[in-house]
Image: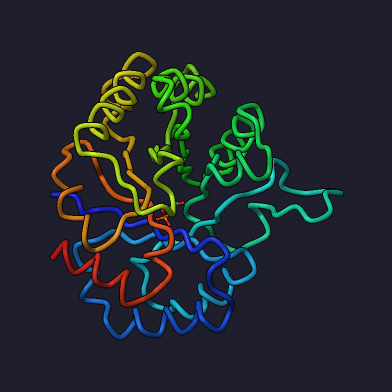
Amino acid sequence: MNRTILAANWKMYLNEDTSIDFIKKMSSDIESFSNSEVILFPSHTCISQVQKELKNLNDIKIGMQDCDIHTKGAYTGGVSLHGLSHIDFCIVGHSERRLLYNESDEVVKNKLETVISNGVNAILCVGETKEQKNDGNTFTVIDAQLSILPKDAISRLTIAYEPVWSIGSGEVPSNKYIEDVLSYIKNKLKSLYSDEIVEKINLLYGGSVDKDNINRLLEVKLIDGFLIGSASADFESFKAIADKLN
Ligand code: PGA
């Protein structure tokens, strides 16, 4: 059986000291994570230190929460995928980037291309706002967000379904709701790619995941793992989630 992916989106919750403290605790309790495939997404400014601190914990993957479309040049403030020694994953199109930083589907598309063409695994986030849900537009929104996918073969892609109304709100959709959206995503992928490719695309759920709801969410068969925000930035609550998988 595949291990459950636990992607920890630390957003801007931790600084260098608190990130290192987290890794120290994790290193001394690593058996708690034996049934999880952990991917940590520290703040960009903390990634190098986290990588150093992880030392021989080769099993823990590291990712960027976002990246620039460009990898080199005169782009003040841009963060390049090439700026760090080794990055396994990069999140693309998180709703906070789309809504707070006005990233359009076109920008998300360019970022996705940059990530994949540079040999890094992409986690593409999709999800509807409360208003879009209430207007019955969930599938239309997801469809538009997925329309940026290349029409030919694709590799190194993971899709995270994160309803915007669930992020940080404590409000989690029912399993049936998540299942319907993930099935929709899966069918869309099947219309684009071969079964062999679709098989390799992992599907994550994100939005208010914690130790109290992880077990019922795991009953959704299409879920390969979780993209976790606030509950991943506190070691004890992240460990409590991982412990539920053991
Ligand atoms: P949350 O965030 O777990 O704090 O709701 C999830 C995310 O934004 O990826």
Q: Residue furthest right?
A: 74
List x then y, in percent, for residue 183.
Answer: 26, 25
Residue at the (24%, 41%) spot, across then down:
223
Left or right of 183 in this view: 208 = right
Residue 61, located in which quarter of the rendered image? bottom left
List x then y, in percent, for residue 121.
Answer: 46, 45
**Colour approach in the figure:** rainbow
Q: Residue furthest top?
A: 191
Residue at the (57%, 68%) spot, across then down:
47
List x then y, in percent, for residue 169.
Answer: 41, 52
**Count of residue discs:** 0
Residue 77, located in which quarter of the rendered image? bottom right
Residue at the (70%, 55%) spot, across then down:
79
Residue at the (50%, 77%) spot, across then down:
19
Q: Quadrant of the C terminus?
A: bottom left
The residue lying toward the viewer, choosing from 117 and 149, is: 149
The residue lying toward the viewer, choosing from 73 and 106, is: 106
Question: In the picture shown, does residue 192 fall above or below 231?
Answer: above
Residue 85, located in which quarter of the rendered image? bottom right
Question: In the picture shown, does residue 171 fall above or below 98?
Answer: below
Question: In the picture shown, does residue 12 fall above or below 26?
Answer: above
Left or right of 237 in this view: 3 = left
List x then y, in percent, for residue 9.
Answer: 46, 58
